[in-house]
Amino acid sequence: MSIGDEKDTIAGIATAQGEGGISIVRVSGPAALAIADSVFACHSPPPSRRDGGTFVHGQVTAGDNPPAGGPGATVVDEAVLLIFRAPRSYTREDVVEIQGHGGVVSAQRVLRRVLDAGARLAEPGEFTKRAFINGRIDLTQAEAVLDLIRAGSDRAAAAAIEQLGGALTSWVTTTYDDLLSLVGGLEVGLDFPDDEMPPLLIEESCRMADAVGRQLDRLLGTWDEGHVVRDGVLTVISGKPNVGKSTLFNALLGTDRAIVADHPGTTRDTLEERLIIDGILLRLVDTAGLRDTDCVIEHQGVLRAKQQMQKADLHIHILDASQPLDRTDRESLSLMPPDRTIVVLNKVDLGVTIEPSSIAEYPVISACFLKPGAVDNLKTTLASRIARYSGGPARVTISERHRQAILAASVDTREAMSLLAHGREEAIAPAVSLLRSAAEELAMITGRVYHDDLLDRVFSRFCIGK
């Protein structure tokens, strides 16, 4: 989608599909008010002659029909029309929103009428893209809109609101400005004859470059929290067949989501559900039992279980307390860092034969899942493990896209500092080039510098009506 497309008038359904109280069809662009006059029948004056920030009740009508309520009018829907005049709208263009009855059919009927009147169907994220191109928001704020829509917990929503308010923009812009100041000082030095170079220029530039590097490190330090807040804590339940994985999965969720049976190998694939603990989203995954098997289908399930274990942010590994550790148990535990693992000894009512020293490096919880309240201690331990993400107010965090740009900027800045540290004047020009590259990487975070591929990657993740 090219920037030239913003001359078109676009339309899309802004509400989720399904039954609901209302549906909203959003129209944005230079012909938005003319289209409203064409499709919306109301008492005088028509929408194009009304002030921005007003609304009017009427009817969406089909074709060249008489005014609302007139004889022979074909009514598509009864609706309320909201009018937003440029630049005081979401896209900074003329915008109208038609609020009709909820439901898939009603919304589609209104949308078809608007498209027939001259609008084109919006592409995913195109409304927000226009808000960015027209200067209403920057790229980090556009991404925050999507983060807010997709938020799976209060914590994620609060972090998105922080970013939407410009907190990350402010942080990145400050670092960007510091880089430009550093570049400007060094470029002034290039204009001096060799014997008139300011004596402290390179030393002061090294100090400033180091300060920028530390600012970038602080930004990078927020990625782990940002990943968890946005995506949730990938929490994988693993263990051999019949140790109680699915029973625990159901107990944590409080519902019979996974099939539980005495027959080994009942779970053949991964199951994922969401669980909120202390405001943090856990993506809880039940996996196939870990064992050697000749069954092709079960073997695929075991492979998928191991793949999930490799990606996990947090492991819950269940052992049958009544059986000694074997090769499979030891191999599984070797894949799990102790600081991200909780070992659960189930079936303690049958006796405990596992040597404590063999699992001493892991936090251990003993339980019998058949007894009421058996998972209470586990929930407490889970809460303590994610406490660093749930305490205090939401703060600015970076996404994976931001992380890659900041990493590149950090590498360039450190390399420039290394060149300048030798104190040679011939190092200034290549250092300036590296620092300019670092500044450009930061500029792409906020969209100060962008290309079409970047915008397509960002906005293609949005729904059509946003």
Image (tube, rainbow, N blue to C red):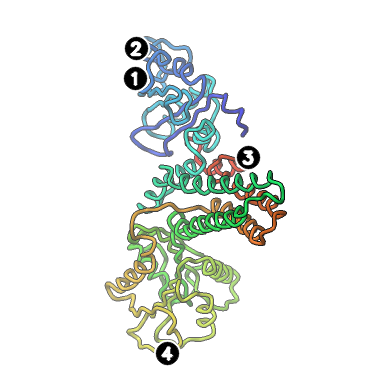
Q: Secondary structure at mark 3?
A: loop
Q: Which residue is mark 1?
A: 56
Image spot of residue 62 (x, y percent) = 46, 18
Query: Mark number for residue 355?
Result: 4
Seen from the viewer's position, the closer of residues 195 and 236 is: 195
Q: Tell me if residue 28 comes above or below residue 191 in the rendering.
A: above
Q: Are marks 3 and 2 in contact (CB under 8 Å)?
A: no
User: Does residue 401 appear in the picture of this structure?
Assistant: yes
* Real-space CA distance between mark 3 and mark 2, rounded to the nearest whole angstrom: 46 Å
What residue is at 41 percent from the left and 88 percent from the top? Answer: 356
Residue at point 41% right, 31% down? 24
Q: Secondary structure under badge 2?
A: loop
Res. 451 mark: 3
Query: 10 Å neighbourhood of mark 3: few (<14), some, or many (≥20)?
Result: few
Check disc 1 and give the amino acid type.
Answer: Val
Q: Give the side of residue 186 with respect to residue 86, left or right.
A: right
Can residue 440 be seen from the camera position used here? Answer: no
Task: Classify 10 Å Cα crowding around label 2: few (below 14), some (14-19), many (20 and above).
Answer: few
Q: Nearer the viewer, mark 3 or mark 1?
A: 3
Residue 442 lies left or right of residue 65; in this view the side is right
Outermost residue, front side: 195
Q: Residues within 10 Å of mark 4 (few under 14, many from 20)?
A: few
Q: Earlier in the sequence, mark 3 or mark 4?
A: 4
Report the number of numbered marks. Answer: 4
State the CA–CA distance, disc 2 to disc 1: 9 Å
> Upstream in the sequence, badge 3 or badge 1?
1
Front tag of 3 and 2: 3
